[in-house]
Image (tube, rainbow, N blue to C red):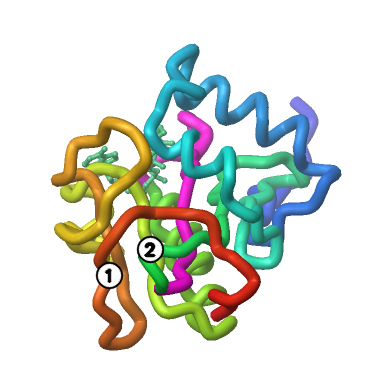
């Protein structure tokens, strides 16, 4: 019997999303969300939002995309905020904290960039573990369960109104 050299597990790193990751991310999102992916209320927001690659991250394991979180600049009423989503982790990599790590990293980058809050549509039981709460004053341009509209605020801003495009006069 020959002895095999012992290899360490592939390192996991979080990096900003770059165009080179695009195809792998699309495939991961298709697997994670299935055919209903583009019917979600969040997709209506992403149609007008400004993508923020410097606030968006993917997890690379052995050079392969294992998870992703995307961030978008929008406003709620007159308050500039960041919209989070989609968030997805490869099925084989779930339940080891990677999803929470991606959310935390994207929120920290947003806070460091001077953003006031992050808003998303998702399940409270998951996202409250990473600091989100129901955002009762925030509305979306499309049908959505208000109990799934969540926010994490970095300062004492009031979030009230419709999620809408961030115009030049509403920069953070
Ligand atoms: C949601 C998702 C990103 C979590 O990734 P992950 O790396 O497994 O997350 P974490 O390791 O940080 O947390 C795992 C825990 O969250 C729980 N969890 C996952 N999705 C949940 C949900 N929708 N509601 C409540 N709890 C949830 C898991 O059961 C697990 O619980 P445990 O720690 O008690 O075992 C991943 O399950 C996924 O890609 N799902 C499909 C896409 C999706 O639903 N994205 C979120 C939509 S906004």
**Which numbered disc covers residue 140?**
none
Which quadrant of the picture is home to ligand 1?
Answer: top left
Q: In this view, does 113 lie above or below 164?
A: below
Q: Is residue 104 above or below residue 23?
A: below
Give the residue pinned by disc 2. 76
Occupied quadrant, residue 172? bottom right
Q: From which residue to which does the magenta span run?
A: 79-95
Give the residue pinned by disc 1. 159
Q: How crowded is mark 2: few (under 14 residues within 10 Å), some or many (20 or more)?
A: many
Residue visible at 56% across and 44% down in the picture: 67
Whether residue 70 appears in magenta in the rendering, the answer is no
Task: Provide the secondary structure element on which disc 2 rests.
Answer: strand
Q: x and y percent of residue 36 in the render? A: 43, 17
Task: Provide the secondary structure element on which disc 1 rests.
Answer: loop
Task: State whether label 1 is within 8 Å of ligand 1.
Answer: no
Q: Can residue 39 be seen in this view?
A: yes
Occupied quadrant, residue 127? bottom left
Residue visible at 65% across and 54% down in the picture: 51
Quadrant in the picture for the N terminus: top right
Residue visible at 69% across and 66% down in the picture: 54
- The reply to whether dot 2 and dot 1 touch (C-beta < 8 Å) is yes
Q: x and y percent of residue 2 in the render? A: 79, 30
Q: Is residue 99 left or right of residue 149?
A: right
Query: Which of these two is toward me, 12 or 138?
Result: 138
């Amino acid at each position: 019997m020959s002895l095999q050299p012992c290899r360490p597990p592939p390192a996991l790193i979080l990096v900003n999303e770059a165009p080179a990751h695009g195809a792998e991310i699309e495939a991961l999102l298709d697997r994670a969300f299935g055919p209903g992916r583009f019917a979600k209320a969040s997709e209506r927001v992403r149609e007008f939002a400004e993508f923020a690659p410097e606030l968006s991250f993917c997890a690379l394991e052995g050079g392969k995309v294992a998870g992703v979180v995307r961030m978008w600049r929008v406003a709620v009423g007159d308050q500039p905020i960041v919209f989070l989503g989609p968030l997805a982790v490869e099925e084989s990599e779930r339940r080891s904290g990677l999803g929470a790590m991606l959310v935390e990293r994207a929120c920290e980058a947003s806070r460091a960039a001077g953003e006031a809050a992050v808003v998303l549509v998702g399940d409270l039981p998951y996202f409250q573990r990473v600091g989100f709460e129901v955002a009762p004053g925030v509305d979306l341009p499309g049908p959505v369960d208000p109990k799934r509209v969540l926010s994490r605020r970095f300062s004492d801003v009031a979030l009230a109104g419709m999620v809408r495009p961030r115009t030049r006069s509403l920069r953070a």
